[in-house]
């Protein structure tokens, strides 16, 4: 019937949107992981620089 066709169409639309949101979420998660890795690298670099600075003071 017409009602079932409409529901099937709506279901497909919702599934498509859900998949797109999943993709966006995954992309954001990977981006965040990358940012966190960069942040850890920067923190490590700063710490090394601080230690080098301390050793030159002595």
Image: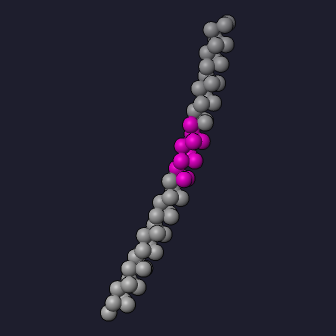
Q: Give the range drawn in magenta.
A: 21-31
Residue occupying the point 50% across, 58% down: 35
- Residue 24 lies, with reference to residue 41, above or below; the image says above
In this figure, which colouring scheme has been used for the structure?
A: one colour
The total of numbered circles placed on residues is: 0
24 part of magenta stretch:
yes
In which quadrant is the C terminus drawn? bottom left
Query: Residue pushed farthest left?
Result: 58
* Residue at image point 41% right, 85% down: 52
- Pick the residue in front: 48 or 37: 48
User: Which residue sits at x=59%, y=26%?
Assistant: 14
Dividing the image into 4 quarters, which one contains the N terminus? top right
Residue 44, horizontal then vertical, whole percent: 44, 73
Q: Residue at x 34, y 85 (%)?
A: 54
Classify 43 as above or below 56. Answer: above
- 46 vs 32, left or right, is left
Residue closer to the observer: 8 or 40: 40
In the rendered image, residue 45, in percent from the top left (x then y), is placed at: 46, 75
Using the image, determine if residue 53 lies above or below residue 21: below
- The picture quadrant where one finds residue 9 is top right
Q: Which residue lies furthest to the bottom in this view?
A: 58
Name the residue at the top extreme: 1
Whether 6 is among the magenta residues is: no
Residue 55, image quadrant: bottom left
Determine the main secondary structure of the stretch shown in magenta.
helix
Give x and y (percent) for residue 17: 59, 30
Q: Where is residue 28 in the image (x, y as percent from the top left)?
A: 53, 47
């Amino acid at each position: 019937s017409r009602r079932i066709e409409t529901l099937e169409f709506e279901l497909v639309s919702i599934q498509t949107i859900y998949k797109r949101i999943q993709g966006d979420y995954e992309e954001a998660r990977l981006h965040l992981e990358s940012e966190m890795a960069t942040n850890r690298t920067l923190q490590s670099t700063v710490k090394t620089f601080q230690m080098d600075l301390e050793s030159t003071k002595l």
